[in-house]
Image (tube, rainbow, N blue to C red):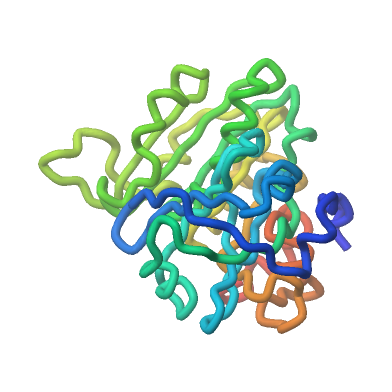
Amino acid sequence: MTMLATEIVRTHADLLLEPHWAEIKSIVPEADDIATYWIRFLDSDEQEAFRFEPGQFNMLYLPGFGESAISISSDPQDNEKIGHTVRFVGNVTRAVSRLKVGDIVSLRGPFGSHWPMKEMEGRDVFIACGGIGLPPLRPALYHIIQNRDEYGKVTLLYGARTSGDLMFPKEYEDWRKAGIDVEVTVDRGDANWNGRVGVVPMWFYQFRIDPHKTTILTCGPEIMIRFVIFEAMARRVPLDRIYVSLERNMKCGQGSCGHCQLGPYFICKEGPVFRFDELQSFFNVEEF
């Protein structure tokens, strides 16, 4: 079992197996087929008690449709509401897309390992992510901003297919003001875009990082993750300071169905966040 897996927060054991009802308080469209659902437990004591670590996920349940593992995309310090950024690609999430403000859903969680916020203190942090890989990293950004003096230089390199596919663009300026170097790129520019054009690994190659003091966090499409890790290894960043989230591979949330198995690991149970030295032997496996 991985070191992070042994540190999984289990302060809400009563929330892990039994679904708890919650109300959708607001819905924010983010891009085509993607929206953030802001949810609050019906029981105010459950809402007050809920805690999670950046990178963890909840199981979102709709009666008649089933459950889906969804990363938490909100501020870990915000006890008022919980954010889940959902891409509508499966049976459950397509049913979620038809929900309205005031509708009731059920949540179990939080589950999974988390980003190494404590271990990164005193170090530079480079976050390289693409597409819907930003939502599971947004809680880490909030944590860094709230504890900015604990971290060195922090860079967010984020890419999307087009400017219309970028997640949370209204927050970028606030993140910059908080001392985060926010760099955004799109695969395809248009007349309304005057920023970077090109994929994340291509721009990652352009940045100068100190391999002796930098931790890499990456999440997004598998091909992007591969090339970010290749480049980090080329810069001689130690393998135990490269962290990857395989949140796209989650299924039942408990490792019971077996769909998330990767070698000896069950991503739902021992991930989704892994140190790369734990995954290296599976790195060249097709569609790891």
| Residue 29 appears left or right of 193 | right
Coordinates of residue 88 in the picture (x, y in percent): 40, 68
The one nearer the camera, 117 or 19, is 19
Looking at the image, residue 174 lies above or below residue 2: above
Residue depicted at 27% across the width and 43% down the height: 197
Q: Quadrant of the N terminus?
A: bottom right
Coordinates of residue 45 in the picture (x, y in percent): 73, 46
Q: Quadrant of the C terminus?
A: bottom right
* Residue 242 visible from this viewpoint: no
| Residue 22 appears left or right of 26 | right
Residue depicted at 84% across the width and 53% down the height: 10
Which of the 4 image quadrants contains residue 226?
Answer: bottom right
Residue depicted at 20% across the width and 33% down the height: 194
Coordinates of residue 268 in the picture (x, y in percent): 71, 68
* Residue 102 visible from this viewpoint: yes
Looking at the image, residue 144 lies above or below residue 86: above
| Residue 241 appears left or right of 42 | right
